[in-house]
Each structure stands twice: as structure tokens, then as C-alpha cells.
Amino acid sequence: MSESAGDVTNAEQPGEDLGFVMRDRLASLTRLRERGVEPFAYAFDRSHTTVEARALLGEGDEEGPVVRLAGRIASWRGQGKTAFAHLVDQEGRLQLYLRRDELGEEAWETSKELHLSDVIGVEGPLMRTRTGEVTVRVTSLTLLAKALRPLPFGKEQVVDGEIVRYSAFSDTEQRARQRYADLAVHPEVRALFTARSLLTRTIRRHLDDLGYLEVETPVLQPLYGGAAARPFITHHNALDMPLYLRIADELYLKRLIVGGFERVYEIGHDFRNEGIDRTHNPEFTMLEFYEAYADYRTMMTRVESLLVAAADVLRAVPTIGASVPTLVTPFPRIEWVPSLVQAAGVDVLALDDAGLKEVAARIGVERPGSLSRPKLLDEMFQALVESKIDTPTFVVDYPKALSPLAKPKRGDDTLTERFELFARGKELANAFSELNDPIDQRERFEAQARLKAAGDDEATMVDEDYLRAMEYGMPPTGGVGVGIDRLLMYLTDTANIRDVILFPTMRPE
RNA sequence: GCUCGGGUAGCUCAAUGGUAGAGCAGUAGCCUUUUAAGCUAUAGGUUGUGGGUUCGAGUCCCACCCCGGGCACCA
């Protein structure tokens, strides 16, 4: 013991001290090796998962076929010459029943060295215990990986079908930092991230079926654009030049429309060098899709069918499905200006600046004096309309001043052909009839460049290459951006973006 | 950035300014259908960090770090 204690000290990270627990487990590992049991195996042939195995035992059956399962030990109830344990794998958990007379002396001794979190393989026939629980009566036991550090498995019981945990691993910081431990002990967290994968798979399938081509555009860009945000800056050594991590995919995807790909989409990470809160992570997953010859009305139907498909798939996921909202199409469509005028009770666009600020102050917009007129209108719209939208609703036809990238609305060039989709007070999608006039585009870039020169660090630069592309002629195009993290939050009723990102950005410990 | 709350054993949590504790996990023992198994014994701590007040600080004061909620920022 005292010898191995020295090893532990060396093995530990500075500042870590599991001390006695890891010492005990290392001692156990040494004893196993001395007995010729290898604590870290190479492979294990399993015949079933825990869920598959449970299904093999019919309703009235007392005995079932022999199965081979692998997973982690999540609970252990030793009882003299027998023991009950629960084995957890990706899909679920199943009880194990170990008997000394059935395992044999060798394996029984090995079983006494097992700890919570150890990864093992077992073989044995299925059976049903006195209380009816499907169980594997273990006849053969293989240690696959010794856990030197215990996972924070809490005890749990099922009350009225609900899992009740005791001493659960609940520290939100540690759960995010050690997502591997969070996932290992919380099946519902695994279910959520399984749902995330299903969501992107469904989106891909849906767009693929519509004839869209999935493409990959640069993350490292010499110029950034397509959104208003502060970028991350990095440096390429060989070229000796700065590169920016993209803040949007938009400008490259539209280059591809120019190139003749008529329907393209990309699902990838955007990076914005801004604050972190429950709806913002510095890197996040964005879906953008562009369709030639389509306008924003067509894109609304695309968004509708995409969301319905996604919700239908997630609704079928156990433990997740219950929180997925029911979506009824077509989603309501409300026009930006009339809905604001109605909510404010005043024709806000007709007011002069002083009158507008007065109304804004009355409805609770903070420091209206410091805001520009378009920003003021946007704040008022957020306070009066957006925040009150619960079921998915398209807000259409934004004022031109709020939408520098959208085409003017046919028949009313004070407005643009733009929509945003809101649900539960949050934005889920943003889309336009895309600007395809290179002369207009150049003017807007130059306006941005002037803002940047004046100190606006979210403004972008003139992208000459993008203008060259557009000068070759860009077909009329509808484009949509959907934040996947926020969409998943909406569909699974998750409040914090950190909970839908496997490894959210955090300060180092 | 502002503001409120929090940080004590591996996990979840206690502790009037007066000897840092419990349950689970761990260790040793008993127990051949248990399931938050049980019983007996036992080990486990730089109370986020650094200062200060005090005879004495987990507790009071100051600064800082980290996390969470709210606000601000973020089309």
C-alpha cells in the first residue's frame, strides 16, 4: 500500500487529490495484475446491447438465451456469496446477478476487485428475478477497463416510472467541463445529444431530398462578412498574414450560386468574438441554405417543412420527445410595420425622433436617447412583438434600414423581402430574397467600410472578390440561416445553450 | 461591464465567531434473488485564493478567482 501511494502522487495532476480513492483502486489494479488478470483489454465481442437483451425475454419467461454484454458498472450490491449490479451501455442499463457458485472461484475473486465505473464484459443467460426485473445471470466475467477515478454515479430508484436520483452529479460547471462524466452517468444527457445528431441528420436528409448539395466553405477567411459581429483573428505563418474565423457562411455560399450550383447548404461552425451567456457560445453551429430562382416566400415553405420534419423526428426520441412542441403549418405570418404599429397603438413610423423616443421610453426600452432611429424601432419591436410570440410565426417585410442585405420589397421599397421566424420569443431563422445587384452591393459594402473606419468594430470590409463574383451575374436567390443550437434548444425546451453543446467554451480550470 | 446568489470530503449537502459533520461512494468484515439492499467497524478536509479583524474565522471585513441567475452587449 505505502509503495503504491508513492506512484499515485506521481500519477496525479498538480492540484488534483483524489488521494485515498485512487490509491485503493491502484492497489486493486496491482492485485489483479499479480493474479494474471489484465485490467485493460483489447476488445470484447458482444452479442447484444442492454436494450436488445431485455427485449429477448418475453413477458412470462423466467429464463432466456445467453447474451454477451459490455458496459460500465453503475451500481453494486454485494451480498456475501452473490452480488447484484447494474451494467450501463449507450442505450440503457440491465441488472447483473453474480453468484460465486456459478462464476467459479477465479472470476469470483476478480469480481471482488471491481468498482463502480469499471468497464466489464459479461456472459450469461437472461433470467427474471423475484421482483420481475430482467437480469443476466453472469457465468463469465471479463474486466475491460479499470476505472482509477470513480464517476459520480448517484444512487437511483424508479418511483412511478420517474427516475429519482440521490447525490446526483448536479454541479453545472463540472458537468460542462467534464462532459464525459456527465454523459457517462446521465442517460438523459446522452439522449439529448443523440437528438442533436438526429436533428442534423434530418436536416441533411430533408435538404438532400429537395435537391440541395451539401458543401464546405472556408472557416479561415482573409476577409470576414455576411453578418455584423466581431471576429476571431488568427495568423498564418507561411503566408504571414492575418486570417479570420468566419462569422457566417453567406458570402461563400452565394459565390457557389454564381458558379452554377443552384441549391446549396452548409452546416458548420461560425465564430463570433462576443460575450457568453445562456444563448451565446463563441462557436456555434449554423445552417445556411441558398436556392437559385427562389424568393423569400419559397424559403418560408422550406423552413416550415424543415422544422416540421425535425420536430417529428425528435418527438419520437424517448425522454426527449415529450418536450417537443407540436407544429401546425402554415405558420402564421405577420408584417413587421403593421404589427408594431398595432402593438404600440401609434403610427411609430410617422413620429419624429423625439416622439419615437418618448414612446420607446414608455414601453421600457432602456436609454432610448442613445440609440439610432432604426435601432430604436428594432428595440421596440423586440419588446412589443418578438418577445410575445410563442408559437412559430414568420415576421415579414422588415424596414430597409434594418436589413442591409435584403432586396427591396416589390411594390414598396421602404421595406425589404426578409423574414425572421420566432418561437417562444426567440429567433429561429432569418432569411431574405438575396441582394443580387452588384452595384447596390458595392454601395452597401462601402457604407460598411465607412462605419468600420469610424470605429464600428462589427462592420465589415469591401469584399472585392465577392463583388467580382456577383458582377458575373447572380441569379435571384432565396437564402436562410438557422442557428442549430437554438433550434435544438427550442425543440427540446432547453434553457441554456451550454446544455446543447457537448464541449461549450469555458475558462480553463 | 453592472448586480444578486453560490464555492466545505470523490458526489450531494450541514455546521450562533468556540474541537469541521452527515448520507452516498471508499476500505475491512457478515450476508446465495438484491435494487437508494442491510448490519458492524473504519478511513477520508490547506472550508476557492490572498490579506485583515479577533484570544479564537467555514462563519465578520477587504481584494481577487471561478460558477450560476438577472441586466447590459450580441441584426
Image (cartoon, rainbow, N blue to C red):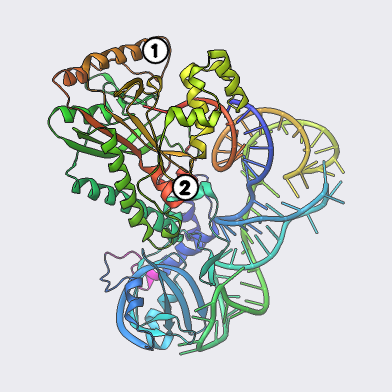
Residue A104 visible in image: no
Q: Note whether A496 is above or below A402 in the view shown.
A: below
Residue A267 visible in image: yes
Quick one: label 1 or label 2, which is nearer the N terminus? 2
- The residue lying at 26 percent from left, 66 percent from top is A43
Labels 1 and 2 touching (C-beta < 8 A): no
Dot 1, how many residues are within 10 Å of its Cα: few (below 14), some (14-19), or many (20+)?
Answer: some
Disc 1, SS: helix
Q: Which residue is mark 2?
A: A176
Q: Amino acid at mark 2?
A: Ala
Percent position of residue A58, x then y: 35, 84
Q: Note whether A155 is above or below A84 in the view shown.
A: above
Q: Which mark is residue A451?
A: 1
Disc 2, SS: helix
Q: Amino acid at mark 1?
A: Leu
Label 1: chain letter: A
Q: CA distance from mark 1 to mark 2?
A: 38 Å
Q: How many marks?
A: 2
Q: Residue A503 colored magenta?
A: no
Of A102 and A372, the residue lying toward us: A372
Percent position of residue A462, x then y: 28, 15
Q: Note whether A151 is above or below A488 in the view shown.
A: below
Percent position of residue A97, x then y: 43, 81
Of A165 and A192, the residue lying toward us: A192
Label 2: chain letter: A
Give the side of residue A4 with respect to residue A442, left or right: right
- The residue lying at 17 percent from left, 24 percent from top is A474
Q: Which residues fall within the magenta stretch? A: A32-42
- The residue lying at 54 percent from left, 67 percent from top is A155
Select label 1 or label 2 by which is in front.
1
Q: Note whether A336 is above or below A105 in the view shown.
A: above
